[in-house]
Amino acid sequence: MTRFFSLPVAWTRKTLLGAACGVAFLTGGVAAQAEPTLTVGSKAPSLDIEHYIHEDLGKFGPVTDFEDGKIYVVEFWATWCGPCIQSMPHLVELQERHRENGVQIVSISDEDLETVEGILERDYPGKEGVTFAELTSAYTLTVDPDGSSTDDYMRAANQNGIPAAFLVGKTGLIEWIGHPMSLDEPLEQVIEGTWDREAFKEEMARQQRLEEAMQKVNRMAGEGNFEDAIKVIDKVLEEFEGVDDEMGQSVREQLTQFKYGLRLDSGDLSEDVMTYFRGQLKEAKGNPQAMAQFSYGLMSSIQQGAKVGKLADETLVALNAEIEGADPQIQPLMHVLVAQMNASLERFDAAIEAQKKAIEKSEGRQKERMEGMLEELEELADVDSTTKKSDDEKEDSSEEGE
């Protein structure tokens, strides 16, 4: 049941999850990588940026080397990256809040200038009358088409996802690397002089070891080698046993969930496994989103061939009970989950009924997609009915022959 596993964005990579996690990834994918040459504690590379979009406004000058006593945020973005666009107002807020503290945010795209200029006069989503140009004029927006800055920072640090930010401290060293939406606390502590660089560096090292272990686990699980995959998880759990911060607690919870999912996928329906998942169901009660997430994980396991016993029926009952109280926007998707789970169990009448409810709750393009899914279910039901009829006829013929 590997789809149950998902670490917070700052602690994992999208390739481990198989699901969107709010981080857009650079082209080329995530391959086996050498040790990073740029990390927390490294001297920040000089910047050689070709185009400064708002240089004429005079708020900030171009940046090459980093001045002693000043603090910089070097952030990487792209026009095609939704999470990057979503982060822009937060960068504005940080720049305005800390301008007097000697903070300069330099945001770099490695696209061509024409591409970036193409969005500047458009209204920023959700801010009618405010263009991208007006919004981003609060900080230093730049374009570096030759990719030299991307090479010096992103690739040197083995960072594959954008947006990504590098916090350069008062002495020109990299203090922090991460998603810009998580920048507030480390930036404030660097300003105040209370930032613990070494502690964060160790946290990043733990994160890297976790990612490497989970890549191995996912590979083993994909090959059906559940026993060895579980052993790897147990070793990681041992490492994080004494880590009492937020990351440690969350990782232990997620790894435990993943471990039980693997046990279920391997066919383990022991009392221990069933008790764990029934506990998860109980915790999700009253939280439609949590119930939908749990149901999706279980449905995925069933579709991959896992035999989940009574847990399927118990989940269907619990999921159906949450639909009416859910946000109207997610009700159609919850009905779809009911339909897909029933279809996975070859209960096509119940699946079709649930899919029709999803259509009733939908409109526009979503309704069209739901109707298409209903047609597919009806086709599957016809095939299933024909197959069963053929099997029955063969059985009757065999009995007559005897």
Image (spheres, grey):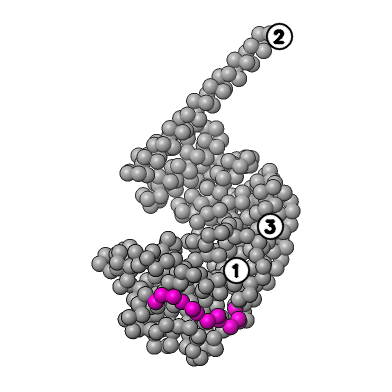
Q: Main secondary structure of the magenta part?
A: loop
Q: Nearer the viewer, residue 254 or 82?
A: 82
Which kind of residue does numbered mark 3 sit on? Lys
Q: Which residue is pictured at 56% across the width and 74% down the height?
A: 152
Q: Residue 300: x and y, percent? A: 56, 45
Residue 158's disc number: 1
Label 1 crowd (10 A; few <14 / some 14-19 / many >=20): some
Q: Is residue 86 visible?
A: no
Is residue 380 shown in magenta? no
**Magenta stretch bounds:** 40-52
| Helix, strand or loop under label 3 | helix
Q: Which residue is pictured at 57% across the width and 58% down the height?
A: 29
Marks 1/2 in contact by CB < 8 Å: the verdict is no
Give the number of marks.
Answer: 3
Residue 241's disc number: none
Residue 402's disc number: 2
Alpha carbon distance from label 1 to label 3: 18 Å
Which kind of residue does numbered mark 1 sit on? Asn
Alpha carbon distance from label 1 to label 2: 70 Å
Q: Residue 145: x and y, percent? A: 46, 69
| Helix, strand or loop under label 2 | loop
Alpha carbon distance from label 2 to label 3: 54 Å
Counting residues from the start of the chain, the first of labels 1 and 2 encountered is 1
Q: Which residue is pictured at 47% across the width and 38% down the height?
A: 339
Q: Is residue 239 visible?
A: yes
Q: Residue 82: x and y, percent? A: 42, 61
Q: Looking at the image, is 99 positioned above or below residue 345?
A: below
Counting residues from the start of the chain, the first of labels 2 and 3 encountered is 3
Residue marked by disc 3: 216
